[in-house]
Amino acid sequence: GLSPVSPIHVYTQREVYGTVGSRVTLSCSFWSSEWISDDISISWHFQADGSRDTISIFHYAQGQPYIDDVGSFKERMEWAGNPRRRDGSIVIHSLEPTDNGTFTCDVKNPP
């Protein structure tokens, strides 16, 4: 049989502005009617303006943040979230013009 599924509502800012060289917080809050499990995972993806490609830039899983080793964000990213407080936010330091694009926060709370 199929196990029941409960939705997670994820909230982010529609637009975030920053200046070159500064830092910006990309907030990601979420709500679920279920208990936040120890297996919760949070992923961030980036799609540059004018590109069709989406790259993975960050993961949180098994209680640990993992910054992906690819792309221009790897040395400039900081985990700012706290899943127990329903927060999956990240900070990007030393903004560059090429950081312009779409960032997506994805939250999974199994089972």
Image (spheres, helix red, strand yellow):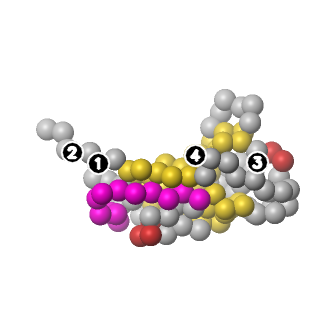
Q: Residues within 10 Å of mark 1 (few under 14, many from 20)?
A: few
Please name the residue that numbered disc 3 is placed on.
Answer: 99
Sequence order check, earlier mark of 3 and 2 = 2
Disc 3 element = helix
**Residue 66 in sight in this render:** no
Residue closer to the observer: 22 or 61: 22
Q: Position of residue 29 (x, y in %)?
A: 50, 59
Q: Read off the magenta span.
A: 27-38
Q: Amino acid at mark 3?
A: Asp
Q: Is 21 on the left-hand or right-hand side of 106?
A: right
Using the numbered discs, state the Cα–Cα distance from disc 3 to disc 2 in whole angstroms: 39 Å
Please name the residue that numbered disc 2 is placed on.
Answer: 4
Q: Position of residue 3 (x, y in %)?
A: 19, 44
Determine the residue positioned at 41% across, 70% down: 84
Marks 1 and 2 close (CB-CB < 8 Å): yes
Marks 2 and 4 close (CB-CB < 8 Å): no
Determine the residue positioned at 67% across, 29% down: 52
Disc 4 element = strand
Q: Amino acid at mark 2?
A: Pro
Q: Is residue 35 magenta?
A: yes
Using the numbered discs, state the Cα–Cα distance from disc 1 to disc 2 in whole angstroms: 7 Å
Q: Is residue 79 magenta?
A: no
